[in-house]
Image (cartoon, rainbow, N blue to C red):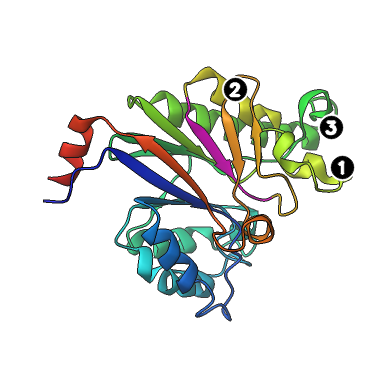
Amino acid sequence: METMKESIRIAAIADLHCTVASQGNFQGLFLQMAQNADVILICGDLTDYGLPEEAQILVKELAPALKLPILVVLGNHDFESGQEDEVVRILSDAGITILNGGNAEFYGIGFAGAKGFIGGFGHGSLQPWGESSTKRFVHEAVEEALKLETALARLRTPQRVALLHYAPIQETVEGEPPEIFPFLGSSRLEEPLNRYPVNAVFHGHAHRGSLQGMTRGHVPVHNAALPLLRRTSPDRPFHVLELPVAPAAVAETTL
């Protein structure tokens, strides 16, 4: 029986962009994460070109952390080669949980995730008006928001954490050139986060964005992009969130 835990540490990162030449580049990082966390989250762009070979290298790099629950969402780079299903299979076979509008529970904490999509923020959000191609574009953002909402709605845990690749608010992309803000996320992703109680949200994609922000409903949002974290916290380039856990939930998990 494992030692009973009063709190759970969640370590989050994004934008690894693992390539076929990345062998040996991430093992130290994942060992450090495993030493500082009970659950690991990776918020998209696990690979650079979405190649199965890249996913296989990543699984080897993850070896120091595979004893822990690892939950991921895919990012835009993971779709680049049209082989995302094979990437998912390789990761799943290694015991990694893929959240694509799904949810999972560890230590009594609920996790919900989706990739998200682009489209802009606030009054600058693209609207479904005009050409059919524009309507399809907006429909993609709406569908991703619905995936997230469905995943959150199915959770019955008192503590909830959301994973995205694209940003749900503008605040955490600030630092990037303003002209590319619409390509970094969508306010449509914020709506489910305000509708359902969430302790924290993690995303990536905005490599030069800001570390933290807040939804209109006062939900903390953290940008976990590795390039950003390496600049701002080189000694520990990942977020760590600690949440208390109900004793009954811990007992069920550790028996």
| Residue 200 colored in magenta in the image | yes
Helix or strand or loop: what does disc 3 sit on? loop
Between 58 and 202, the one nearer to me in the picture:
202
Query: Quick one: label 2, few (<14), some, or many (20+) residues within 10 Å?
Result: few
Give the residue at x 71% y 49%. 206
CA–CA distance between discs 1 and 2?
24 Å
Give the mark, 1 or 3, whose residue is nearer the N terminus: 3
Q: Nearer the viewer, residue 11 or 187?
A: 11
Q: Which residues are magenta?
A: 198-205
**54 falls in the magenta region:** no
Picture layout, residue 58 above or below residue 213: below
For the residue marked with disc 3, what is the amino acid?
Glu
Circle 1 Cα neighbour tier, 10 Å, few/some/many (<14 / 14–19 / ≥20) = few
On the image, the x and y values in percent for residue 203 come to: 59, 44
CA distance separating discs 3 and 2: 36 Å
Can you identify the residue that label 2 sits on?
218
Q: In the rendered structure, which amino acid carries the disc numbered 2?
A: His
The residue closer to the viewer here, 246 or 179, is 246
Q: Position of residue 84 (x, y in %)?
A: 53, 59
Q: Which residue was labeled with disc 1?
A: 178
Q: Which labelled disc corresponds to residue 19?
A: none
Closer to the observer: label 3 or label 2?
2
Quarter of the image where the C terminus is located: top left
- Type of amino acid at the residue the image marks with label 1: Pro
Where does label 3 land, which residue?
131
Whole-Å distance between the Cαs marked 1 and 3? 25 Å
SS label for mark 2? loop
